[in-house]
């Protein structure tokens, strides 16, 4: 109550926003701008916090959703004049690092995996299997590029070239975001945008993070031992909490585990 009374000094408050999971538009557990919007807005608005701390554990995912979430965090930070600090747990790679770069400062554990500033598109080719089974693929389009990268047809050089151009443009956007957010902190003598990853203090050495630190002790050192934490995160539905999933959610969970597995997690 005293936080709302005039002339009474309130204890500092930090809103802790948990961003855990793969970034995408499908599945109950994935991070998306639509799903996180009310949570992010509340974290910045409720009780006028002294800071917002991002608790990140994400292997990445959709570049568009990463950009939208990061842009929302930046907009609210600037509108409300609230600093943002990111604390990385196991991993902030690819889109996960995009989110971390939305913060004013980034901290991680000594064993955290960071970076992977690149873009990937993966799939499969099943045309040989179909041919062996005597199955004929029939595709009819209006527009010569409509069936680009169809996994049931042989890969064409034209499609691959077109896909590489798309990936390169997204990569440029990613690089620009990191450079704008990290600025002179980045080690200009190193090529940090190859998709490579760094562990803990190695990430600090090249300027991808500001230091090795954990959320609670770091915020106490900054705001005092009486700092209070308000925690926010995406809510899961009842069926999801008790372990019941529809088929779509089960596949989304498998995909998410595959994303984490890329970094040995």
Image: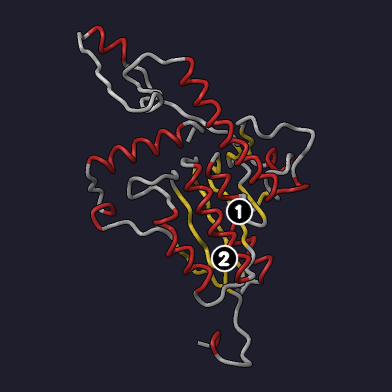
Q: Which mark is residue 102?
A: 1
Instruction: Check disc 2 and report the residue beneath it.
Output: 76
Q: Residue furthest front?
A: 142
Q: Pick the residue in front: 251 or 152.
A: 152
Q: Residues within 10 Å of mark 2 (few under 14, many from 20)?
A: some
Disc 2 secondary structure class: helix
Q: Is residue 133 above or below residue 22?
A: above
Q: Residues within 10 Å of mark 1 (few under 14, many from 20)?
A: many
Q: Which mark is residue 118?
A: none
Mark 2–mark 1 Cα distance, whole angstroms, equals 11 Å
Name the residue rendered at 49%, 74% in the picture.
Answer: 46
Q: Pick the residue in front: 259 or 112.
A: 259
The earlier-in-sequence mark between 2 and 1 is 2
Question: Where in the figure is residue 109, as x and y percent of width and height?
Answer: 61, 47
Question: Where in the figure is residue 26, as x and y percent of width and height?
Answer: 35, 45
Q: How is this picture coloured?
A: secondary structure
Question: Where in the figure is residue 264, as x and y percent of width and height?
Answer: 49, 32
Name the residue rendered at 39%, 23% in the picture.
Answer: 144
Q: Quadrant of residue 116?
A: top right
Q: Residue furthest left?
A: 134
Q: Quadrant of residue 188?
A: top right
Report the label total: 2
Q: Quadrant of residue 105?
A: bottom right
Question: Where in the figure is residue 221, as x and y percent of width and height?
Answer: 68, 65
Disc 1 secondary structure class: loop
């Amino acid at each position: 109550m005293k936080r709302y009374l005039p002339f009474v000094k309130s204890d500092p408050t930090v809103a802790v926003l948990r961003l855990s999971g793969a970034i995408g538009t499908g599945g109950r557990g994935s991070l998306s701008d639509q799903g996180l919007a009310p949570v992010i807005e509340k974290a910045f608005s409720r009780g006028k916090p002294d800071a917002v701390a991002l608790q990140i554990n994400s292997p990445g995912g959709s570049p568009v959703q990463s950009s939208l979430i990061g842009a929302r965090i930046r907009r609210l930070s600037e509108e409300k004049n609230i600093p943002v600090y990111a604390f990385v747990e196991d991993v902030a790679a690819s889109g996960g690092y995009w989110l971390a770069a939305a913060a004013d400062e980034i901290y991680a554990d000594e064993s955290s995996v960071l970076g992977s500033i690149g873009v990937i598109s993966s799939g499969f080719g099943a045309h040989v299997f179909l041919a062996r089974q005597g199955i004929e693929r029939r595709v009819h389009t209006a527009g010569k590029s409509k069936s680009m990268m169809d996994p049931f047809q042989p890969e064409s050089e034209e499609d691959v070239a077109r896909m590489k151009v798309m990936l390169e443009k997204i990569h440029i956007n990613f690089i620009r975001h990191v450079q704008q957010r990290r600025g002179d902190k980045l080690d200009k003598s190193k090529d940090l945008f190859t998709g490579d990853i760094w562990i803990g203090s190695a990430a600090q050495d090249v300027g991808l993070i500001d230091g090795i630190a954990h959320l609670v002790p770091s915020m106490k050192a900054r705001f005092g031992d009486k700092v209070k934490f308000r925690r926010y995160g995406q809510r899961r539905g009842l069926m999801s909490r008790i372990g019941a999933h529809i088929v779509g959610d089960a596949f989304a969970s498998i995909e998410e585990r595959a994303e984490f597995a890329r970094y040995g997690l």
